[in-house]
Image: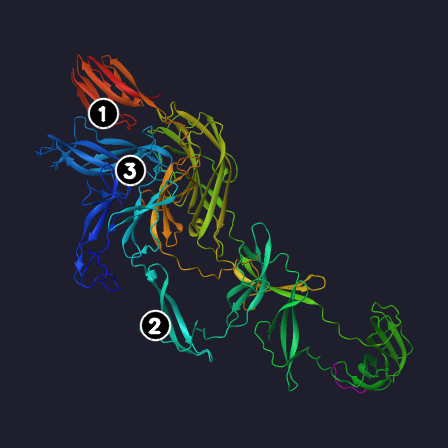
Amino acid sequence: MPVEPLPCGPEGGGTPGACNCSPSIATSPLCCADGSTVLLVVRSACVTCGTTAADPAVVGWINPETGVFTAGQPACDVVPCDTPTCVETLCRQRCDDTTGDGQANTTYSELWCVQADGTATLVLTYQDDPSTPYTPTSPVECTYGCPASETVMLCDDSGPFLRRYTFLAGTATYEDVALDGQTPHVVIGTVGVCPAAPDCASPTTPTATVGLCLADGTPIAVLITRDCDGVTTQAGWVNLTTGTYSVGAPPAGAAACGDSRAFELAGILCDTDPATGDVLGLVLVQYEYNPDGSLAAVDLVNPADGTPYTLQGELMHCPTGQDQPDPDLVILCDVQADGTATQFVRDYRRDENTQITGFTDYTLAGAGYTPTGTVGTCDPPPCGSTITVPLCDLQLDGTSRPFLRRLTFDCAGNVINSVDTTNGTSPYSVTGTVAVCPPAPTPVIPQVFQGEFILCDDNGPFVRKLVQDDTGAVTAVVDLTLDGTAYTPIGTVGQCPVDVPGPVPVTPTVFHGELLLCDDNAPFVRKLVQAPDGTVTAVVNLALDGTPYTPVGTIGQCQPAPEPCRDSSTLLLCDLPTDGEPAPTLTDTPGGPYYPYTTGVAAPGAQTLWDGGTLTLPAAAGPQPGTGGTVRTAAAILQAPRPVCDAGTAHVTVQVDVTQLGPDNGCRITGFLGLYNGPGDANRVGIALAPPDTPAGWTGTLTVEADVPADDLAAGNIAVLVAFDAYDDSGATCPPPRHTGWQLDEFAATVVYDQTGCAEQFLRNVTLDCETGAVVSVTDTTLDGAPYTVTGEPGQCIPASSDTAAPPCDAQNVIEACRCDDADGDGIPEVGYVELLAVDCTGTVSSVGTYLPDYSAPYTPVSPMDCDAGEDLGAPPAFGVQAHRVELAAGATWSADAWPTLQSVTAVAHGGAATVTTADGTSTLHPTETATWGVSRDTDARLTGPLTITAGPGTVTITFTTGVQL
């Protein structure tokens, strides 16, 4: 689209009516055929103010390595540097039936492009001249030796393997096999061309960052170079108007063209009457900056219509319109990594429902404080304490209002905080005089001592109550029946014919009373013996244990025991669930669904392994029919009951101890422990491989960890699989065939459900004896005060941060960084990936994410390391070609299957015809005819059969070559 020109003056800096031009813009790097890069400079033509801008055009190009600007078109044809290219091209000869008789009567060629991910695409069809396309009439199978397949070597995270393409009617399909050409290969990780060296072996091409302008509006481009470690260097900058390159940083004041920092809004504030606090209006504050960043002007705007606003009072933050409840204060500790702790005060804010809405932190002296470590309760608690005292607010009318005052003391016993409430939570404001509440009035009775006795008259027992004064003199007598109704004795009143209970012996007198009194030492019991008329005839004093006692000092009524000294505190705790780590169960199951290859053989008795015992996988004598190997497998379904609450996922860990029993060393990938969420490799969620070429006698532990859906784990959809080579005939890769046995034991599986957010908050009220420090009582309640029963394990809650993150600073540029990963733990960086780094407006570099080299998907590195690591491990092995020649007598047969590293074959018939059998069928090798087969590239691993030559009545000479390692 056209680029809008800069505005005409006077504010725009130009002359009214004159020609103004749009800034030049540099494109992203483009590539020439030789691999060099250029930056095209695009500009819209100058126009007169008010006319439509012209379409942009290329006015020149910049060499990013030198910064030199050259006018006009570049000297080469350029394409986007990230245009997908073919890492391999395959040419196939095909046959066509142009006459319609069903027989091939002409040939043509197909050119296929193999991408880095292993996919193949048909590029063109032609006969003799590739520039002239050819459209086949009716493609048919060739019958004279045209190959129908092609094999290339690719690499995944485990190393090289063979991908065999089959071409039919313009469609390519493929299968993956090991380097022996027979054993199926399971792709692990990313497929691509086998690299000769890490991709990031040299610094990247400089990149121009455009969209920047000098203080006077001149557009510029900043050149940035990134090395293999991701470190960026600013080499210089280019004036896009003149093409001049300058070394170093741009001049001060350079900023994004049309930078929004020229204006900044401070948000909505309130025009407030300083005398009354009334809000007179809403105000939007706008700051305007000069190009060099200095403040140019401050404007007040009416946010409703955008018109200027005239301030009437003072500019203040708008009030919330609601009174805030009193804060709660608690002393917490900021614990550092070295174990040291700093006490500070956390001021909790609550709403009208007493719910916590936020908090502010202070030092013990009242200054602002920001924790730098882990915040928690102080252990041991501060040496000060908090007590709650019942007090009364005495009013002028003589009435009193009770309230609670919570006092907080420091270590020296000084009061550092005082909070008044009505019931422990609702704030209370004192309006009168604070004093200790007066004791409740004691009922006034005219007598002091009272006694109660069971007596008998002529009718039977009744109750006589005696009211006595301080001297013990009886002042009143009340008689009642045993059910408490009034009673008038009849006949003779006396002691009932039974012994009087108690430690005092029976005396000849009739009435007894018992009183609890106190002297200067302690309480004691006074027994009164009285005559029938109530006169006290004897006094017996006893200690509380019933022994005789002599009172000391003043005798009187015992005063109520003083209230014990108690100290209470309330802790916010969390009821942490304890059902998130159940013991899983493992049930043996066939391994075929998880290892769907014909080389697999199920190992019997594997439940012994899942129960923690030992499972031996013996070596095999040979391969499975039609394959080149035997792999012994065992699988089990892993299930664990789901907890009452979880976040939807669970972390599963399985491990097993493995010993390679021999007798031979293994070849390449020899076995693995895998975790699956469904059948097949597509549902494998984790894998741990035995070391490549595992030597006999090796012992180690394989461990796999993965996060799986909680539903699938509880439903029994998760499976664990072990698979290890028992026989491997990989041909030239590891000759001769390998026989390997294995011992597996100490299998273990653990499950941890993610229970984030499942902890229930509650309040624990702890009452202590303030003299001994002993815990008197512990009461748990919900946050609103209802009783609460802990169902899990009480623990500390992790407080949510109340800090509000600063608004992000937009990224000004995004750069790439080549990275390398040691995915299999062998200390060699075999996997390359890309990390995107964002540079914000402050120059801070932050990671955006990590991805596969083609950005087709995110990539999570296992063990990032320097891409140059492992380069000194030695040169790769060298290979050569061995020459062979044999002569077949009449009737003798030669087969390519006997030569696993076959490279080329030439057969000549002498004295009679011979028979040749290939994948296309059986054909005749005529007398004196020569037939040749061979690989076409150095990267081809071998010439594969079937290829069988049988001599007829004459002889056949066969000349062939095989690959050998030097």
Query: Residue at label 2?
Result: 303
Front disc: 1 or 2: 2
Tell me the quadrant of the picture where the N terminus can be found: bottom left
Query: Residue at label 1?
Result: 918
The x and y percentages for residue 788 are 57, 64
Which quarter of the figure has residue 622?
top left
Q: Nearer the viewer, residue 27 or 571?
A: 27
Seen in the picture, residue 301 relative to 96 is either above or below; the reply is below
| Measured Cα–Cα span from mark 1 to mark 3 | 27 Å
Seen in the picture, residue 632 relative to 790 is either above or below; the reply is above
- Mark 1 and mark 3 residues within 8 Å of each other at the beta carbon: no
Q: Nearer the viewer, residue 416 or 181?
A: 416
| Measured Cα–Cα span from mark 1 to mark 2 | 86 Å
Front disc: 1 or 3: 3
Does the rendering let one see residue 851?
Answer: no
| Measured Cα–Cα span from mark 2 to mark 3 | 60 Å
Front disc: 2 or 3: 2
Q: Is residue 488 magenta?
A: yes
Identify the secondary structure beneath mark 3: loop
Seen in the picture, residue 97 relative to 652 is either above or below; the reply is above
- Inspect the image, locate mark 1, and give the three-letter code of the amino acid beneath it: Thr
Query: Residue at label 3?
Result: 118
Check the image and name the residue furthest to the left.
Answer: 99
Which quarter of the figure has residue 945?
top left
Does the rendering let one see residue 21?
Answer: yes
Q: Nearer the viewer, residue 774 or 873?
A: 873
The x and y percentages for residue 499 are 86, 73
**Tag 3: Cα neighbours inside 10 Å, few (<14), some, or many (≥20)?**
some
Residue positioned 72% across, 62% down in the render: 772
Q: Which residues are magenta?
A: 483-489
Residue positioned 31% across, 74% down in the render: 307
- Inspect the image, locate mark 2, and give the three-letter code of the amino acid beneath it: Pro
